[in-house]
Image (cartoon, grey):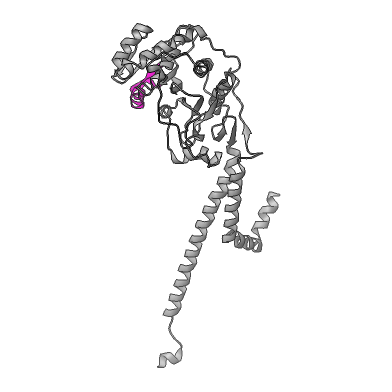
């Protein structure tokens, strides 16, 4: 068939007929309409696929939370301590944590600190990071991160080091530039409020690559297992009137609203950010109002907080059990919902058609310009030719 097709194209009559069709404006419009129709069809069957974990080493179904309900009773007092006098001053926070949890924080500056728990049975060549911003607006996130870190460091069955980071994004970037990012294989940032009902999953890409989809699938599977409502943050950052595919692509095309964990991507570290939303969140984005009920009174641990602690703990345990980096799942995709996505093999033809339309349009403009230039040159040459004999005699 290929030989017949190549022979057919070598015929000058067939080649001329195809060129006359391809380089017409009607053909470009036809390709543009076909690409647009294909893009709108991507949100429907058979282009939409269900997510599934492809890496067998991700033991999502067998990893259990070891933090008991009795251990969770230590979270409300810790939250009150962090939302109190130490919510801004890192030195005061360090002294408070030494009293309440015997945690020794290493100070980088007055706004950023970290603590490391070395793996008792590992070589210490790799590390996991748990990060939370610490300020008056993020004290609940810091309390959850400190609580999980102190609970995890009580056990001796870790193969990788665990690093706790507390502070703003600027301090995090400075800490990574200080040579601490070489051994980190996974980082998880927490940015939740004290009153919420839905967990939002943020993920960012770099150089056209999205994070390994198994990371997202693992978090979604854990949330489903522990009964925690979860959604994609990209679907909340844009108006609900936009199609899901447009909302998923808008963040990648505009580069707006980067997540906290995006700092890790420049160091080739797999990372995610977990934030929160309530039913009253606006369609344009998350509500900027912060409610800290625990600042004035001690509140019991809610079901959503219990589920959040279990999800973060199990995710770190799953990452600790990995002997190599994830590589089996997708890196080019658009997530429509936490359970559905569009792969590269489905959306690439639509974008290829759009690129072909631009190429044909550009070629048509160049060819029209060349024809106009050739016509002007011929007219100029004809005007400069000598006249006939009668005009010479005259």
Taking depth in this image into account, of 55 and 202 the one nearest to the observer is 202
Q: Is residue 24 above or below residue 220?
A: below
In percent of width and height, residue 38 lies at: 61, 46
> Relative to 321, is 259 on the left or the right?
left
Examine the rendering and report whether any part of residue 68 can be seen.
no
Is residue 171 shown left or right of residue 358? left
Decide: is 111 above or below 241. above
In the figure, residue 8 lies in which quadrant? bottom right
Tally the numbered discs.
Answer: 0
Q: Residue at x 36, y 17 (%)?
A: 83
Most common SS among magenta residues: helix
The outermost residue toward the front is: 297
Query: In terms of depth relative to the viewer, which is nearer, 198 or 387?
Result: 198
Q: Is residue 187 magenta?
A: no
Residue under the image location 44 percent in, 86 percent down = 387
Q: Position of residue 142 (x, y in %)?
A: 40, 18
In terms of depth relative to the viewer, which is nearer, 393 or 296? 296
**Residue 107 x %, y %:** 31, 16
Magenta stretch: give its range.
Answer: 164-182
- At x 32%, y 14%, the residue is 93
Q: Is residue 140 above or below residue 19?
A: above
Quadrant of image for the C terminus: bottom left
């Amino acid at each position: 068939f290929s030989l017949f097709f190549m022979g057919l194209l070598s015929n000058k009559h067939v080649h001329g007929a195809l060129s006359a069709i391809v380089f017409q404006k009607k053909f470009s419009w036809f390709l543009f309409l076909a690409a647009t129709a294909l893009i709108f069809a991507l949100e429907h069957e058979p282009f939409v696929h269900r997510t599934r974990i492809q890496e067998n080493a991700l033991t999502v179904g067998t990893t259990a939370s070891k933090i008991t309900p009795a251990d969770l009773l230590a979270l409300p007092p810790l939250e009150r301590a962090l939302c109190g006098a130490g919510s801004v001053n890192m030195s005061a926070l360090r002294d408070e944590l030494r009293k309440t949890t015997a945690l020794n924080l290493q100070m980088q500056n007055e706004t950023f600190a970290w603590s490391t728990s070395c793996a008792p049975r590992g070589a210490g060549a790799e590390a996991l990071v748990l990060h939370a911003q610490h300020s008056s607006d993020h004290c609940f996130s810091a309390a959850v991160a400190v609580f999980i870190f102190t609970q995890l460091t009580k056990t001796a069955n870790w193969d990788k080091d665990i690093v706790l980071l507390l502070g703003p994004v600027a301090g995090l970037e400075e800490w990574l530039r200080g040579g601490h990012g070489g051994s980190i294989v996974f980082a998880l940032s927490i940015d939740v409020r004290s009153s919420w009902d839905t967990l939002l999953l943020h993920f960012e890409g770099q150089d056209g690559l999205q994070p390994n989809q198994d990371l997202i699938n693992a978090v979604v599977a854990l949330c489903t297992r522990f009964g925690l409502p979860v959604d994609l943050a990209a679907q909340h950052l844009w108006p609900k009137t936009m199609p899901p595919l447009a909302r998923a692509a808008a963040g990648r095309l505009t580069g707006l609203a980067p997540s906290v964990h995006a700092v890790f991507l420049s160091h080739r570290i797999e990372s995610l950010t977990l934030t929160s939303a309530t039913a009253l969140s606006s369609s344009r984005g998350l509500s900027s109002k912060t409610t800290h009920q625990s600042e004035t009174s001690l509140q019991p641990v809610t079901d959503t907080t219990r589920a959040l602690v279990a999800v973060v703990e199990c995710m770190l345990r799953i990452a600790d059990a990995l002997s190599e980096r994830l590589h089996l799942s997708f890196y080019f995709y658009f997530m429509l919902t936490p359970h559905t996505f569009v792969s590269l093999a489905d959306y690439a033809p639509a974008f290829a058609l759009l690129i072909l339309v631009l190429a044909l349009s550009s070629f048509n403009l160049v060819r029209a310009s060349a024809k106009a230039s050739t016509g002007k040159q011929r007219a100029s040459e004809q005007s400069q030719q000598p006249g006939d004999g009668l005009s010479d005699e005259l």
